[in-house]
Image: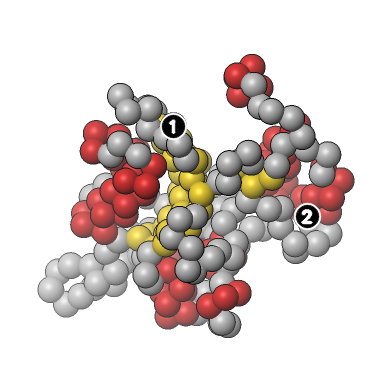
């Protein structure tokens, strides 16, 4: 989907922890895309708009990865709801999302295919990484993670990869990376389940990507 400002948003659904779906949420991932494209002009504006909409109205879908691109920048944003917790007033005390967004460096390519892919991320680099203030504290509260903030991995906490995620989802990312790099053998042990070391979120291609390559 693209608006008149050449802001483009695409997505894949990764599901994530099922208890984090919110049956009371009013806005799903498709509506987030369409409403955001009506309001935002840049990728950064889109990221903040998506977060504001979901936190204001409640998020009605499972985990999502968004590709968010404008003429100057490309980002991957991953988010998931917080589930439902009765606030005693007929509302949801956990309404909204936890999320992280990473900018793809110039000259690199990235991919996602129905599995969360953002692992650890910089906490003090707003030019290249944005995230919700409770993305780590909520994982600690829910016992999804124990450890220092510096070692926190979004996908391991909120959408840990199982065998099917590796073979059916990450394998498609591997295939894409394999088209544009010579690192296929390096990443293959992860796809086969022989190592827990994931592929990077983005890689430097071995040639300039053409319009035909994109098609």
What residue would you read off at disc 1?
Answer: 71
Find numbered disc 2 in the image and state the secondary structure of the residue it sits on: helix
Find numbered disc 1 in the image and state the secondary structure of the residue it sits on: loop
In contact (CB < 8 Å): disc 2 and disc 1: no
Within the image, what quadrant is residue 178 found in? top right
Tell me the quarter of the image containing the N terminus.
top left
Observer-nearest of 83 and 76: 76
Question: In the image as oriented, which residue stretches furthest toward the right?
Answer: 185
Q: Position of residue 76 (x, y in %)?
A: 50, 47
Q: Nearer the viewer, mark 2 or mark 1?
A: 1
Q: Is residue 169 above or below residue 70?
A: below
Visible in this render: residue 25? no
**Disc 2: CA contacts within 10 A as few (<14), some (14-19) or many (>=20):** some
At x 30%, y 24%, the residue is 4
What residue would you read off at disc 2?
Answer: 190
Q: Position of residue 70 (x, y in %)?
A: 42, 35
């Amino acid at each position: 989907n693209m608006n008149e400002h050449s802001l483009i948003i695409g997505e894949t659904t990764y599901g994530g922890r099922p208890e984090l779906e919110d049956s009371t949420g009013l806005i799903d991932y498709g509506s987030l895309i369409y409403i955001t494209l009506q309001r935002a002009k840049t990728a950064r504006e889109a990221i903040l708009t998506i977060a504001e909409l979901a936190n204001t109205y409640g998020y009605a879908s499972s985990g999502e990865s968004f590709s968010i691109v404008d003429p100057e920048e490309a980002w991957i944003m991953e988010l998931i709801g917080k589930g439902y917790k009765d606030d005693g007033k007929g509302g949801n005390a956990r309404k909204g999302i936890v999320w992280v967004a990473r900018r793809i460096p110039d000259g690199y390519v990235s991919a996602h295919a129905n599995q969360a892919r953002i692992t650890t991320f910089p906490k003090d680099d707003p030019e290249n990484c944005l995230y919700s203030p409770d993305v780590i504290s909520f994982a600690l509260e829910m016992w999804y993670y124990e450890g220092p903030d510096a070692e926190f991995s979004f996908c391991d906490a909120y959408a840990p990869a199982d065998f099917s995620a590796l073979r059916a989802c990450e394998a498609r990312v591997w295939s894409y990376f394999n088209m544009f790099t010579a690192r296929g053998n390096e990443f293959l042990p992860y796809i086969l389940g022989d190592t827990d070391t994931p592929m990077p979120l983005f890689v430097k291609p071995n040639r300039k990507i053409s319009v035909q390559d994109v098609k």
